């Protein structure tokens, strides 16, 4: 979500197989997803602009 | 799992009062969200982005200024009984034991409320079983101050689940805990969800925490 206005910016389906062991959070696949979502939030914090999904 | 949407937000906007509404100042704007039965979703965003507002809308604690919200096929017009909530602070009542804290929703929410006296033994067994699944077996008679922060948070998750809600709402539930305890509680939550398949809406600013899920930011 973005801040002021509070909007959904990105919706992302997480395709990692289940059940998800804690170890999953240390894999490159997982890190890649975190990094991508982090990028959206980082972009908003910098510009205050809403990026499109 | 059915294909019907369990949670359905249609163009939902919320301004907290008439003055803000007149100024077109909304806490959340144009929220569209469809969640299937049994899905686990996370909403991620910075502080002040309206995540908690979203939770209040979902549980019927706030009515939208514009748009419509449906949960389990019904329009949301007031506080929902089919949801359980847990927050960043465990908010256990200090004068109640762990068991009595977990039992609290059953003393408040119908149909359990009117059956509480007759079925107390059965309810207490249900609470004990839930406490055992989160590793708190044997702590029934302890008071909150006798538990660590992580244990209190586990108890508060049990309290949110005791009435077997169809929907569990978590507002930064593990934010105040150390990294190891947080990871442990992720696993406990994942196992409870895998077993019971209630809907989970998890609100967090921690991206790693959205690990079990489909996620939105």
Image (cartoon, coloured by chain):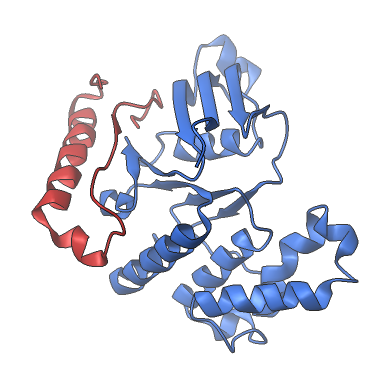
Chain colours: A red, B blue
Please indicate whether residue B12 sits to the left or right of residue B194 in the image: right
Toward which corner of the image does residue A25 lie, by quadrant?
A: bottom left
- Residue ranking furthest to the bottom: B138
* Residue B69 drawn above or below residue A41: above
- Camera sees residue B96: no
* Residue B56 drawn above or below residue A44: below
Task: Indicate the position of residue B3 as horizontal and vertical percent values.
Answer: 49, 32
Toward which corner of the image does residue B161 lie, by quadrant?
A: bottom right
Residue drawn 27% across the image and 48% down it: B207
Residue drawn 55% across the image and 64% down it: B157
- Return the residue nearer the eye: B162 or B96: B162
For the C terminus of chain B, which image quadrant? top left
Please indicate whether residue B66 sits to the left or right of residue A50 in the image: right
Task: Indicate the position of residue B121 as horizontal and vertical percent values.
Answer: 80, 78
* Residue B27 drawn above or below residue B104: above
* Residue A41 drawn above or below residue B190: above
Residue drawn 88% across the image and 63% down it: B115
Residue drawn 64% across the image and 79% down it: B128
Task: Indicate the position of residue B188 as horizontal and vertical percent values.
Answer: 42, 68
- Camera sees residue B40: yes
Task: Indicate the position of residue B160 as horizontal and vertical percent values.
Answer: 61, 59
Give the tally of numbered discs. Answer: 0
- Residue ranking furthest to the left: A28
Please indicate whether residue B94 sits to the left or right of residue B200 in the image: right
């Amino acid at each position: 979500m973005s801040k002021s206005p509070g909007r959904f910016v990105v919706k992302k389906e997480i395709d990692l197989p289940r059940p998800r062991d804690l170890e999953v959070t240390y894999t490159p696949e997982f890190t890649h997803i975190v990094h991508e979502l982090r990028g959206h939030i980082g972009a908003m914090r910098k510009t205050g602009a809403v990026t499109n999904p | 799992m059915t294909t019907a949407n369990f949670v359905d937000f249609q163009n939902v906007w919320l301004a907290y009062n008439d003055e803000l509404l007149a100024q077109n100042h909304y806490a959340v704007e144009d929220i569209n969200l469809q969640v299937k039965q049994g899905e686990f979703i996370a909403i991620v965003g910075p502080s002040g982005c309206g995540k908690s507002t979203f939770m209040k809308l979902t549980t019927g604690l706030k009515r939208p200024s514009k748009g419509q919200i449906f949960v389990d096929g019904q329009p949301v017009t007031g506080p929902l009984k089919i949801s359980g909530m847990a927050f960043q602070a465990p908010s256990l009542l200090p004068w109640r034991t762990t068991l009595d804290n977990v039992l609290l929703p059953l003393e408040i929410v119908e149909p359990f409320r009117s059956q509480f006296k007759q079925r107390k033994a059965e309810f207490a067994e249900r609470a004990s079983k839930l406490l055992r699944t989160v590793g708190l077996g044997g702590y029934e008679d302890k008071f909150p101050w006798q538990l660590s922060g992580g244990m209190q948070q586990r108890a508060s998750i049990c309290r949110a689940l005791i009435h077997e809600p169809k929907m569990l709402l978590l507002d930064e539930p593990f934010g105040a805990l150390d990294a190891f305890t947080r990871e442990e509680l992720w696993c406990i939550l994942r196992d409870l969800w895998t077993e019971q398949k209630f809907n989970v809406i998890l609100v967090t600013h921690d991206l790693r925490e959205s690990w079990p899920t489909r996620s939105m930011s």
